[in-house]
Image: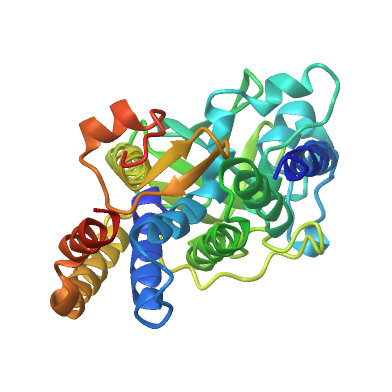
Amino acid sequence: MADLLTHVLVAYSVAVVLSWRLHWITTPYVTALMVGSTLPDLTRIGLLIDPGLIERTGIPFSYSPLHTLGGALITFLIISLTTVKNFKPVSMLLGLGVLTHFALDLLLINASGHSFTVLWPLTAYRPPTPGLYLSTDLWPALLAGAVALVVWYTDSKRRFGSKNIYACIDNYRHEHDG
Amino acid sequence: MYRRIPKRMLMVAALFTILISLFVWHGSLSPDPESNIYPGERELIRDHHGYIGEKVEVGGRVISESPLTIEVKYGGETMELFVTGTDAKVREGDRLTVFGTLQEDNIVTASKVVVQPFLNIVYMYLVSIVAALWVLSRILTQWRWNHRDKALEPRERPGNLRESISRFFAGGEHG
Protein backbone atom coordinates (compact mmCIF):
# COMPACT_ATOMS: atom_id res chain seq x y z
CA MET A 1 0.00 0.00 0.00
CA ALA A 2 1.31 3.38 -1.02
CA ASP A 3 0.85 6.06 1.59
CA LEU A 4 -2.73 7.28 1.90
CA LEU A 5 -1.88 10.85 0.91
CA THR A 6 -0.62 9.74 -2.51
CA HIS A 7 -3.77 7.69 -3.02
CA VAL A 8 -6.05 10.56 -2.08
CA LEU A 9 -4.15 13.12 -4.21
CA VAL A 10 -4.26 10.88 -7.27
CA ALA A 11 -7.97 10.23 -6.69
CA TYR A 12 -8.58 13.97 -6.43
CA SER A 13 -6.79 14.61 -9.74
CA VAL A 14 -8.63 11.79 -11.53
CA ALA A 15 -12.01 12.98 -10.23
CA VAL A 16 -11.48 16.64 -11.12
CA VAL A 17 -10.25 15.80 -14.64
CA LEU A 18 -13.30 13.54 -15.11
CA SER A 19 -15.56 16.36 -13.93
CA TRP A 20 -14.44 18.42 -16.94
CA ARG A 21 -16.28 15.94 -19.16
CA LEU A 22 -18.91 14.60 -16.77
CA HIS A 23 -20.58 17.65 -15.32
CA TRP A 24 -22.55 15.73 -12.71
CA ILE A 25 -19.25 15.14 -10.88
CA THR A 26 -19.48 18.16 -8.59
CA THR A 27 -17.19 18.77 -5.61
CA PRO A 28 -19.01 16.35 -3.23
CA TYR A 29 -18.68 13.62 -5.86
CA VAL A 30 -14.96 14.34 -6.22
CA THR A 31 -14.80 13.54 -2.51
CA ALA A 32 -16.68 10.27 -3.12
CA LEU A 33 -13.93 9.12 -5.48
CA MET A 34 -11.33 10.15 -2.87
CA VAL A 35 -13.15 8.08 -0.23
CA GLY A 36 -13.10 5.11 -2.62
CA SER A 37 -9.33 5.42 -2.96
CA THR A 38 -8.91 4.90 0.81
CA LEU A 39 -11.13 1.81 1.13
CA PRO A 40 -8.63 -0.99 0.35
CA ASP A 41 -6.44 0.33 3.20
CA LEU A 42 -9.21 -0.52 5.66
CA THR A 43 -6.95 -3.56 6.15
CA ARG A 44 -5.23 -1.20 8.61
CA ILE A 45 -8.04 -2.07 10.99
CA GLY A 46 -5.58 -4.85 11.82
CA LEU A 47 -3.58 -2.27 13.78
CA LEU A 48 -6.56 -1.98 16.14
CA ILE A 49 -7.95 -5.51 16.07
CA ASP A 50 -5.13 -7.98 15.48
CA PRO A 51 -6.29 -10.77 13.12
CA GLY A 52 -3.78 -13.07 14.83
CA LEU A 53 -5.64 -12.65 18.11
CA ILE A 54 -8.94 -13.49 16.40
CA GLU A 55 -7.27 -16.61 15.01
CA ARG A 56 -6.43 -17.72 18.54
CA THR A 57 -10.09 -18.56 18.93
CA GLY A 58 -9.49 -21.23 16.31
CA ILE A 59 -11.20 -19.44 13.45
CA PRO A 60 -8.87 -18.66 10.53
CA PHE A 61 -9.04 -14.93 9.83
CA SER A 62 -7.42 -12.34 7.59
CA TYR A 63 -8.28 -8.78 6.60
CA SER A 64 -6.42 -9.18 3.30
CA PRO A 65 -9.66 -9.58 1.28
CA LEU A 66 -10.33 -5.86 1.86
CA HIS A 67 -7.28 -5.21 -0.30
CA THR A 68 -8.56 -7.37 -3.18
CA LEU A 69 -11.13 -6.81 -5.89
CA GLY A 70 -13.77 -9.02 -4.25
CA GLY A 71 -13.53 -7.54 -0.77
CA ALA A 72 -13.26 -3.95 -1.97
CA LEU A 73 -16.32 -4.45 -4.19
CA ILE A 74 -18.33 -5.58 -1.17
CA THR A 75 -16.95 -2.72 0.95
CA PHE A 76 -17.98 0.03 -1.43
CA LEU A 77 -21.38 -1.57 -2.05
CA ILE A 78 -22.03 -1.68 1.71
CA ILE A 79 -20.97 1.95 2.08
CA SER A 80 -23.06 3.17 -0.87
CA LEU A 81 -26.11 1.19 0.30
CA THR A 82 -25.93 2.44 3.88
CA THR A 83 -24.92 6.08 3.47
CA VAL A 84 -26.55 7.60 0.40
CA LYS A 85 -29.81 7.57 -1.50
CA ASN A 86 -28.21 8.24 -4.88
CA PHE A 87 -26.64 4.79 -4.98
CA LYS A 88 -25.55 4.64 -8.61
CA PRO A 89 -23.22 7.65 -8.98
CA VAL A 90 -21.72 7.23 -5.52
CA SER A 91 -21.02 3.51 -5.93
CA MET A 92 -19.50 4.14 -9.36
CA LEU A 93 -17.14 6.78 -7.96
CA LEU A 94 -16.22 4.72 -4.89
CA GLY A 95 -15.47 1.81 -7.23
CA LEU A 96 -13.35 3.99 -9.47
CA GLY A 97 -11.47 5.23 -6.38
CA VAL A 98 -10.76 1.63 -5.42
CA LEU A 99 -9.36 1.00 -8.92
CA THR A 100 -6.99 4.00 -8.65
CA HIS A 101 -5.80 2.54 -5.33
CA PHE A 102 -5.06 -0.85 -6.88
CA ALA A 103 -3.37 0.73 -9.91
CA LEU A 104 -0.91 2.57 -7.62
CA ASP A 105 -0.30 -0.41 -5.35
CA LEU A 106 0.45 -2.74 -8.28
CA LEU A 107 3.58 -0.64 -8.88
CA LEU A 108 4.95 -1.01 -5.34
CA ILE A 109 8.35 -2.55 -4.66
CA ASN A 110 7.97 -6.02 -3.24
CA ALA A 111 10.68 -8.35 -1.91
CA SER A 112 9.44 -11.32 -3.95
CA GLY A 113 9.02 -9.18 -7.08
CA HIS A 114 5.33 -10.03 -7.09
CA SER A 115 2.52 -7.71 -6.15
CA PHE A 116 -0.64 -8.57 -4.20
CA THR A 117 -3.53 -10.89 -5.09
CA VAL A 118 -5.51 -8.08 -6.69
CA LEU A 119 -8.13 -10.27 -8.41
CA TRP A 120 -8.90 -12.53 -5.45
CA PRO A 121 -11.21 -14.43 -5.03
CA LEU A 122 -11.34 -14.88 -8.82
CA THR A 123 -7.68 -15.89 -8.80
CA ALA A 124 -4.86 -15.83 -6.24
CA TYR A 125 -2.40 -14.72 -8.93
CA ARG A 126 0.13 -12.11 -7.84
CA PRO A 127 1.18 -10.13 -10.92
CA PRO A 128 4.86 -9.20 -11.19
CA THR A 129 5.51 -5.65 -10.02
CA PRO A 130 7.75 -3.13 -11.77
CA GLY A 131 8.76 -1.99 -8.25
CA LEU A 132 8.67 1.78 -8.70
CA TYR A 133 8.33 2.91 -5.08
CA LEU A 134 7.78 1.99 -1.46
CA SER A 135 4.86 3.17 0.63
CA THR A 136 7.43 4.90 2.84
CA ASP A 137 9.03 6.89 -0.02
CA LEU A 138 8.50 10.65 0.00
CA TRP A 139 8.48 11.39 -3.71
CA PRO A 140 5.21 9.69 -4.73
CA ALA A 141 3.20 12.09 -2.54
CA LEU A 142 5.28 15.06 -3.75
CA LEU A 143 4.71 14.12 -7.39
CA ALA A 144 1.01 13.40 -6.84
CA GLY A 145 0.74 16.70 -4.95
CA ALA A 146 2.35 18.63 -7.81
CA VAL A 147 -0.03 17.02 -10.32
CA ALA A 148 -3.01 17.73 -8.05
CA LEU A 149 -1.95 21.39 -7.80
CA VAL A 150 -1.81 21.73 -11.59
CA VAL A 151 -5.23 20.05 -11.87
CA TRP A 152 -6.67 22.28 -9.12
CA TYR A 153 -5.28 25.41 -10.83
CA THR A 154 -6.57 24.38 -14.26
CA ASP A 155 -9.94 23.55 -12.74
CA SER A 156 -10.28 26.92 -11.02
CA LYS A 157 -9.38 28.63 -14.33
CA ARG A 158 -12.02 26.62 -16.15
CA ARG A 159 -14.61 27.61 -13.59
CA PHE A 160 -13.68 31.26 -13.86
CA GLY A 161 -16.73 32.06 -16.00
CA SER A 162 -19.08 30.41 -13.56
CA LYS A 163 -17.11 31.39 -10.48
CA ASN A 164 -20.07 33.08 -8.91
CA ILE A 165 -22.27 30.05 -9.27
CA TYR A 166 -23.39 30.28 -5.64
CA ALA A 167 -24.39 33.89 -6.11
CA CYS A 168 -26.37 32.80 -9.19
CA ILE A 169 -28.13 30.10 -7.18
CA ASP A 170 -28.99 32.66 -4.49
CA ASN A 171 -30.35 35.07 -7.08
CA TYR A 172 -32.39 32.35 -8.67
CA ARG A 173 -33.87 31.33 -5.33
CA HIS A 174 -34.55 34.88 -4.43
CA GLU A 175 -36.44 35.45 -7.64
CA HIS A 176 -38.40 32.23 -7.62
CA ASP A 177 -39.07 31.59 -3.95
CA GLY A 178 -39.85 35.18 -3.07
CA MET B 1 -39.22 4.73 -0.30
CA TYR B 2 -40.36 2.85 2.83
CA ARG B 3 -40.20 -0.40 0.95
CA ARG B 4 -36.72 0.28 -0.27
CA ILE B 5 -35.10 0.54 3.13
CA PRO B 6 -35.71 -3.03 4.32
CA LYS B 7 -34.56 -4.33 0.95
CA ARG B 8 -31.36 -2.36 1.30
CA MET B 9 -30.93 -3.66 4.84
CA LEU B 10 -31.22 -7.23 3.60
CA MET B 11 -28.65 -6.59 0.90
CA VAL B 12 -26.26 -5.01 3.42
CA ALA B 13 -26.70 -7.94 5.81
CA ALA B 14 -25.99 -10.36 2.95
CA LEU B 15 -22.92 -8.39 1.86
CA PHE B 16 -21.58 -8.31 5.44
CA THR B 17 -22.01 -12.07 5.67
CA ILE B 18 -20.10 -12.54 2.43
CA LEU B 19 -17.34 -10.17 3.61
CA ILE B 20 -16.88 -12.03 6.92
CA SER B 21 -16.85 -15.31 4.97
CA LEU B 22 -14.08 -13.91 2.76
CA PHE B 23 -12.07 -12.99 5.90
CA VAL B 24 -12.35 -16.55 7.16
CA TRP B 25 -11.77 -18.11 3.73
CA HIS B 26 -8.64 -16.03 3.12
CA GLY B 27 -7.42 -16.86 6.61
CA SER B 28 -7.65 -20.57 5.83
CA LEU B 29 -5.54 -20.33 2.66
CA SER B 30 -2.14 -21.98 2.67
CA PRO B 31 0.99 -20.60 1.03
CA ASP B 32 1.22 -21.54 -2.63
CA PRO B 33 4.70 -20.89 -4.02
CA GLU B 34 3.46 -21.86 -7.49
CA SER B 35 1.25 -18.75 -7.41
CA ASN B 36 4.03 -16.74 -5.76
CA ILE B 37 2.29 -16.85 -2.38
CA TYR B 38 5.07 -17.66 0.07
CA PRO B 39 5.02 -18.53 3.78
CA GLY B 40 5.02 -15.27 5.76
CA GLU B 41 4.90 -14.03 9.35
CA ARG B 42 1.90 -16.15 10.26
CA GLU B 43 3.26 -19.43 8.92
CA LEU B 44 6.75 -18.95 10.36
CA ILE B 45 5.51 -18.09 13.83
CA ARG B 46 3.19 -21.08 13.86
CA ASP B 47 5.54 -23.67 12.45
CA HIS B 48 8.87 -22.50 11.13
CA HIS B 49 10.40 -25.96 11.17
CA GLY B 50 7.84 -26.95 8.58
CA TYR B 51 9.24 -24.47 6.08
CA ILE B 52 12.99 -25.09 6.32
CA GLY B 53 14.48 -25.18 2.84
CA GLU B 54 11.53 -23.28 1.38
CA LYS B 55 11.26 -19.76 -0.02
CA VAL B 56 9.72 -17.38 2.50
CA GLU B 57 8.68 -13.73 2.35
CA VAL B 58 8.70 -12.18 5.78
CA GLY B 59 9.10 -8.75 7.33
CA GLY B 60 9.86 -7.29 10.72
CA ARG B 61 11.58 -4.59 12.73
CA VAL B 62 15.38 -4.64 12.73
CA ILE B 63 16.51 -5.29 16.31
CA SER B 64 20.20 -5.83 15.62
CA GLU B 65 22.48 -4.70 12.82
CA SER B 66 25.14 -7.31 13.40
CA PRO B 67 24.19 -10.05 13.11
CA LEU B 68 21.31 -8.67 11.08
CA THR B 69 18.23 -9.68 13.05
CA ILE B 70 14.56 -8.89 12.60
CA GLU B 71 11.72 -9.35 15.03
CA VAL B 72 8.77 -11.01 13.33
CA LYS B 73 5.36 -10.55 14.93
CA TYR B 74 2.04 -12.24 14.51
CA GLY B 75 -0.95 -12.56 16.81
CA GLY B 76 0.87 -11.28 19.88
CA GLU B 77 3.76 -13.70 19.38
CA THR B 78 7.24 -12.83 18.20
CA MET B 79 10.27 -14.64 16.86
CA GLU B 80 13.74 -13.53 15.83
CA LEU B 81 15.07 -14.23 12.37
CA PHE B 82 18.71 -13.82 11.31
CA VAL B 83 19.09 -12.49 7.79
CA THR B 84 22.22 -13.39 5.82
CA GLY B 85 23.31 -12.89 2.25
CA THR B 86 22.69 -9.16 2.09
CA ASP B 87 24.83 -6.08 2.61
CA ALA B 88 21.84 -3.76 2.87
CA LYS B 89 22.47 -0.78 5.14
CA VAL B 90 20.01 -0.85 8.00
CA ARG B 91 19.61 0.65 11.44
CA GLU B 92 17.73 -0.61 14.45
CA GLY B 93 14.08 0.35 14.15
CA ASP B 94 13.98 0.12 10.36
CA ARG B 95 11.60 -2.35 8.78
CA LEU B 96 13.18 -5.07 6.70
CA THR B 97 11.29 -7.47 4.46
CA VAL B 98 13.25 -10.39 3.15
CA PHE B 99 12.55 -12.81 0.35
CA GLY B 100 14.80 -15.82 0.68
CA THR B 101 15.31 -19.39 1.79
CA LEU B 102 14.65 -20.44 5.37
CA GLN B 103 17.55 -22.38 6.93
CA GLU B 104 18.03 -24.13 10.27
CA ASP B 105 18.42 -21.97 13.40
CA ASN B 106 16.06 -19.21 12.28
CA ILE B 107 18.32 -18.05 9.48
CA VAL B 108 16.99 -16.69 6.19
CA THR B 109 19.39 -16.46 3.27
CA ALA B 110 18.18 -13.44 1.37
CA SER B 111 17.55 -13.32 -2.36
CA LYS B 112 16.24 -9.82 -1.96
CA VAL B 113 15.57 -7.45 0.91
CA VAL B 114 13.48 -4.29 1.09
CA VAL B 115 14.39 -1.76 3.77
CA GLN B 116 12.05 0.94 5.04
CA PRO B 117 13.91 3.41 7.29
CA PHE B 118 12.27 4.21 10.61
CA LEU B 119 11.81 7.93 9.84
CA ASN B 120 10.15 7.10 6.52
CA ILE B 121 7.70 4.85 8.36
CA VAL B 122 6.89 7.74 10.72
CA TYR B 123 6.46 9.97 7.64
CA MET B 124 4.10 7.45 6.03
CA TYR B 125 1.85 7.29 9.09
CA LEU B 126 1.83 11.08 9.52
CA VAL B 127 0.86 11.90 5.93
CA SER B 128 -1.67 9.08 5.93
CA ILE B 129 -3.34 10.63 8.98
CA VAL B 130 -3.28 14.02 7.22
CA ALA B 131 -4.94 12.42 4.18
CA ALA B 132 -7.61 10.76 6.30
CA LEU B 133 -8.40 14.07 8.04
CA TRP B 134 -8.52 15.85 4.68
CA VAL B 135 -11.06 13.39 3.29
CA LEU B 136 -13.07 13.48 6.52
CA SER B 137 -13.24 17.27 6.49
CA ARG B 138 -14.36 17.20 2.84
CA ILE B 139 -17.17 14.77 3.73
CA LEU B 140 -18.28 16.96 6.63
CA THR B 141 -18.27 20.19 4.65
CA GLN B 142 -19.67 18.86 1.37
CA TRP B 143 -22.23 16.32 2.57
CA ARG B 144 -24.84 16.35 5.31
CA TRP B 145 -27.11 13.84 6.96
CA ASN B 146 -30.71 14.00 5.86
CA HIS B 147 -32.94 12.61 8.63
CA ARG B 148 -35.94 12.12 6.39
CA ASP B 149 -34.09 9.91 3.90
CA LYS B 150 -31.71 8.52 6.53
CA ALA B 151 -28.90 9.14 4.09
CA LEU B 152 -26.11 11.54 3.26
CA GLU B 153 -26.80 14.11 0.59
CA PRO B 154 -24.48 16.53 -1.17
CA ARG B 155 -24.68 20.12 0.08
CA GLU B 156 -25.43 22.74 -2.51
CA ARG B 157 -22.48 24.68 -1.25
CA PRO B 158 -19.65 23.58 1.01
CA GLY B 159 -19.86 24.96 4.55
CA ASN B 160 -16.97 25.93 6.74
CA LEU B 161 -15.68 23.07 8.83
CA ARG B 162 -16.75 24.12 12.33
CA GLU B 163 -20.26 25.04 11.24
CA SER B 164 -20.54 21.89 9.14
CA ILE B 165 -19.64 19.65 12.06
CA SER B 166 -22.20 21.26 14.36
CA ARG B 167 -24.91 21.15 11.70
CA PHE B 168 -24.00 17.85 10.06
CA PHE B 169 -26.86 16.01 11.72
CA ALA B 170 -29.12 19.04 12.01
CA GLY B 171 -30.70 18.15 8.67
CA GLY B 172 -31.89 21.70 8.09
CA GLU B 173 -33.06 22.85 4.69
CA HIS B 174 -30.09 25.10 4.15
CA GLY B 175 -27.51 23.32 6.35
User: x and y percent of residue B134 in the render?
Assistant: 30, 44
Image point (18%, 62%), residue name:
A171
Task: State the scheme by which the image is colored.
Answer: rainbow
Vertical placement of residue A51 versus A134, above or below: above
User: x and y percent of residue B170 in the render?
Assistant: 38, 28
Q: Nearest the camera: B123 or A111?
A: B123
Is residue A103 visible in this depiction of the protein? yes
Q: Splitting the image into 4 quarters, where does residue B32 fall?
A: bottom right
Left or right placement of residue B69 versus residue A14 in this view:
right
Quadrant into which the N terminus of chain B falls: top right
Q: Nearest the camera: A112 or B5?
A: B5
Quadrant into which the C terminus of chain B falls: top left
Image point (53%, 36%), residue name:
A44
The mark tally for this picture is 0
Q: Splitting the image into 4 quarters, where does residue B20 fall?
A: top right
Q: Residue furthest bottom?
A: A21
Vertical placement of residue A46 versus A22, above or below: above
Is residue A1 visible in this depiction of the protein? no
Q: Nearest the camera: A109 or A104?
A: A104
User: x and y percent of residue B62 in the render?
Assistant: 43, 33
Image point (78%, 42%), residue name:
B3
Vertical placement of residue A12 versus A41, above or below: below
Q: Splitting the image into 4 quarters, where does residue A160 fall?
A: bottom left
Vertical placement of residue A131 versus B27, above or below: below
Image point (66%, 70%), residue name:
A127
User: x and y percent of residue B135 in the render?
Assistant: 36, 46
